[in-house]
Image (tube, rainbow, N blue to C red):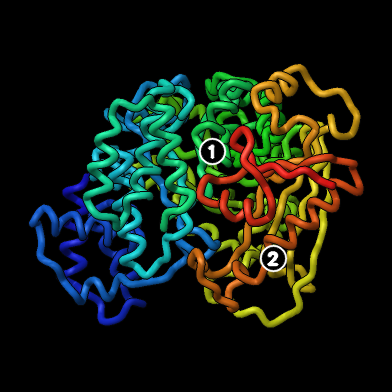
Amino acid sequence: MLQAYDNFIISAIENLPRCPEDILTLKKKLSKQFSLPIPTNADMRQRYEKMIEEKIIQRNVGFEKTLMTRGVRTASGVAVVAVLTRPSDCPGKCLYCPTEKDMPKSYLSNEPAVMRAIANKFNPYRQVQSRLKALELNGHSTDKIELIVMGGTFSHFPKTYQKKFITECFRAANEYSVGKNNELRIKNQEKDTPNNKLFKEQKRNEKTKHRIIGLTLETRPDYIDEKEIANFRLLGCTRVELGVQSIFDDVLELNKRGHTISETIRATKLLKDAGFKINYHIMPGLLGSTIKRDIEMFRQLFTNQDFQPDMLKIYPTVVIKDSELYAVWKKGNYKPLTDKHFEKLIIEIKNKIIPPYVRIARLVRDVPTPSIEAGPIISNMRQIVAKKAACRCIRCREVRADYDIKENIILDRIDYGASDGKEIFLQFVSEDKNKLFALLRLRLPYNNLEIETTKETNRLYKLLPALENSAIIREVHTYGKLAQINQHDKSSPQHIGLGKKLIQEAEKIARKEFGAKKIAIISGIGVRGYYRKQNYRLQNTYMVKNLK
């Protein structure tokens, strides 16, 4: 597959467009020719540099200029760096899941993120460094990194591998653009315990140039318990992507998912009570479902307090040859969604269901069209429905890197119940609420409201005592141009104090309305210094402040 990708890039250089605007047309043509998904400019730049290193091609200044772009990779205020874990056995036996040899379960070798991992032999250090290089070469600032660990059920890996993998990610960020002396110093620490190595790299990352301000891990609902949550916090995780797929037990059983909805409800509550942001993976079009049931599923996600995820990745079910679903489809026992069905479903969801405190992170997966035997194949569904849907989700309202602040900014508040607790969503928006500049998620678990907690939550707080009798800030995020650390840019919402004002408002609400004596923030490693300036101190991996 890498050979096809190399030929793709060679052909792109040979047929170089005259202006950057024409690169997309060329990429579409070559993607069809080589049966590959359309790569981002950053993906092409990353492989291009590797090909130069391997002496496959020579440097081409014209090609590099054509690829230079600021795009959307850092438009949300952070540089997203996705890395993949090594191929391994998976606890799931899902009907729809491809099982390609030597690939992480559910991933295909011709997906862009997977090709990047293959090129770096699934080495976390190399993956992070090469991705940072590609982003910077394409004009992106990489001071603030949102690290996303992909590859399936992270919880299924041995704890030793988990710690080593995450340690290497932090080390890669710490040593990016740093000389060889640091590399040698780290190698001399081999006698350290895995915990010590991890803590040392995390400590370095608090003050280094490239800081990991958020860490996302993928797992299954049935793998979440109090000990796993404590482990995730030890690693520095701030957001969890849960493979929920459906909220109907009969659909989960038909598709051999291996867990029930009760486990999703339990995992969601535990994660929220620990302050995590939660991103559900949802799959419309599964065997046993219908469009009507899918719409009802999305409606329940935001009317039933047992769910209420903060984010969604919506992946329509597709038939892939290396899956059990392929045989079911070939026998005529499964009818997948069409592109029109999926488009209609998304428009309905966006127009009538998605609340403003939710972010639709993705609408389709990067499954290359040649690998899809049946099901939706349109990869740019977000752009298609944008003209037909009046979506209020965070992604559709967040200001981007090129946005100049002109209108008045107001503070808006939304209260809702979730997982037996009180959620307060604070946002700085334009007066018509169509532009979002900053947000904060404040949680008041029911123990703060003098209602008995569950035994699991009590066990959780024994492992993480910083959270006991505490209000919890689960997220603080300012959008707009990624402002570099220690530099002030008044044109960016990131440097006009919106985050600080939201924290102060959350403290006031927690103290005055709910009588909270303290407040805890689930903090990314690289942003701890920011909270220290607001008089927070580190306790049990959380930033904590007593409220007067």
Separation of marks 2 and 1 at Cα, in angstroms: 24 Å
Locate the N terminus by quadrant: top left
As drawn, is 467 to the left or to the right of 95? right
Callout 2 secondary element: helix
Q: Quadrant of residue 279?
A: top right
User: Can the viewer see residue 320 in this picture?
Assistant: no
**Within 10 Å of the Cα at label 2, are there few (<14), some (14-19), or many (20+) other Cα atoms?**
many
Q: Along the line of sight, which residue is nearer the eye, 339 or 484?
A: 484
Name the residue tied to disc 2.
Answer: 498
As drawn, is 49 to the left or to the right of 369? left
The residue depicted at 16 percent of the width and 49 percent of the height is: 3
Can you give x and y, in whole percent of width and height, for residue 151 in the image?
41, 35
Any mark on residue 237, and which? Answer: 1
Q: Along the line of sight, which residue is nearer the eye, 254 or 393?
A: 393
Name the residue type under label 1: Cys
**Marks 2 & 1, CB-CB < 8 Å contact:** no
Q: Along the line of sight, which residue is nearer the eye, 319 or 280?
A: 280
Relative to residue 22, is residue 463 depicted above or below?
Answer: above
Relative to residue 60, is residue 113 depicted above or below?
Answer: above
Callout 1 secondary element: loop
Can you give x and y, in whole percent of width and height, for residue 439 in the image?
70, 58
Label whose residue precedes the other's in the sequence (2 or 1): 1
Q: Quadrant of residue 23?
A: bottom left
Can you give x and y, in whole percent of width and height, for residue 139 in the image?
37, 70
The residue depicted at 79 percent of the width and 70 percent of the height is: 410
Q: Along the line of sight, which residue is nearer the eye, 362 or 87?
A: 87
The residue depicted at 31 percent of the width and 43 percent of the height is: 125
Can you give x and y, in whole percent of width and height, for residue 270 in the image?
69, 28
